Image (cartoon, grey):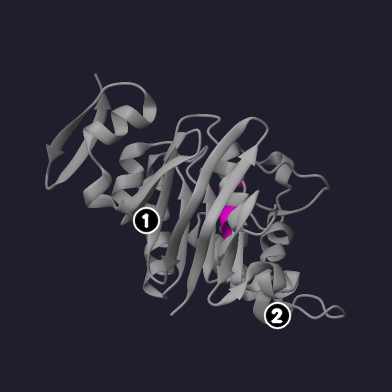
């Protein structure tokens, strides 16, 4: 069984402590949402889990091996990350950008194969970009660009998907239907999904586990059914929220 384990992890950025001595294991088939106020260090924690920055203290274990001991190539084959915002640095098409997700699996001397291109075209079609393969990134809307980045992550075929505000710029159809299908597919294949989420109701809808960052390093983690309470969320966001039952689900709204 695949696992990503944080052992007594302390993560800081400037004067902000995202977590202090956090010990948690993310396991195959689980979907986690990281919740907390703006500026609390959620994105910094996600980058740390990806191995892109070092924690202040503690270790990260991929299965039983320290993440530090795994080569960048092997790490990129195991863990993929969708950043909150990705501005194109160089001119590129939709297809070229999606194919960057295949790079960890290619040899140093070979380019993309026909199978990689066909795979990319299928994923782009699933994400609503059929016939847009040669469009330049600069010509896309924010939501269209977001779906290209999601396509690249899907094509990376990692066991862990780290998503920083994955629903940014997406309209309701893509937030609920497309994201729901992507998350279900990762979960069904035994992957681990860890998302930084802004929308509490989408987080509780998609996730079976929550990691709450309260500030000054305090955290709480566990099953969504146990942690998704008006009391916890009101303290988390420092604003009173109420929980409303609807059609077998619960939704949270500020008072």
Q: Residue at x 76, y 75 (%)?
A: 112
**Disc 1 secondary structure class:** helix
Q: Is residue 148 above or below residue 197?
A: below
Q: Residue at x 33, y 21 (%)?
A: 239
Q: Main secondary structure of the magenta part?
A: helix
Q: Residue 180, which numbered label?
A: 1
Q: Residue 114, which numbered label?
A: 2
Q: Is residue 188 above or below residue 252?
A: below
Compare residues 234 and 19 and report the one nearer the observer.
19
Is residue 29 found left or right of 119 in the rendered image?
left
Q: Is residue 235 above or below residue 194?
A: above
Percent position of residue 59, x then y: 60, 62
Q: Residue at x 72, y 63 (%)?
A: 100
Does the segment drawn in magenta span residue 146? yes
Give, as a single range, the part of the protein colored magenta.
145-151
- Quarter of the image for residue 110 reads bottom right
Compare residues 142 and 35 and report the one nearer the observer.
35
Q: Residue furthest right?
A: 109
- Quarter of the image for residue 58 reads bottom right
Compare residues 243 and 115 and report the one nearer the observer.
243
Where is the C terminus found, in terms of image quarters? top left
Percent position of residue 243, x then y: 18, 33
Q: Earlier in the sequence, mark 1 or mark 2?
A: 2
Nearer to us: label 1 or label 2: 1
Is residue 121 something one can see in this rendering? Answer: no
Is residue 191 found left or right of 14 in the rendered image?
left
**Disc 2 secondary structure class:** helix
């Amino acid at each position: 069984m695949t696992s990503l384990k944080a052992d007594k992890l302390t993560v800081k950025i400037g004067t902000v402590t995202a977590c202090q001595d956090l010990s948690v294991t993310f396991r195959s088939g689980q979907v986690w949402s990281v919740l907390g106020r703006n500026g609390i260090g959620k994105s910094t924690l996600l980058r740390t889990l990806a191995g892109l920055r070092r924690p202040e203290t503690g270790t990260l274990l991929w299965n039983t091996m320290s993440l530090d001991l795994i080569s960048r190539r092997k790490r990129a084959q195991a863990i993929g990350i969708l950043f909150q915002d990705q501005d194109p640095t160089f001119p590129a098409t939709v297809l070229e950008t999606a194919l960057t997700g295949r790079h960890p699996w290619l040899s140093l001397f070979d380019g993309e194969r026909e199978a990689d291109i066909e795979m990319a075209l299928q994923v782009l079609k699933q994400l609503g970009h059929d016939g847009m393969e040669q469009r330049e990134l600069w010509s896309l809307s924010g939501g269209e660009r977001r779906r290209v980045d999601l396509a690249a992550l899907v094509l990376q075929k990692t066991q862990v998907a780290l998503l920083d505000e994955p629903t940014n710029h997406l309209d309701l159809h893509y937030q609920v239907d497309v994201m729901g299908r992507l998350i279900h597919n990762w979960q069904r294949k035994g992957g681990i999904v860890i998302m930084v989420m802004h929308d509490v109701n989408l987080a509780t809808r998609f996730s079976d586990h929550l990691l709450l960052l309260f500030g000054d390093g305090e955290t709480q983690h566990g099953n969504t059914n146990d942690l998704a309470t008006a009391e916890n969320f009101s303290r988390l966001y420092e604003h009173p929220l109420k929980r409303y039952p609807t059609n077998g689900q619960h939704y949270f709204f500020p008072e």
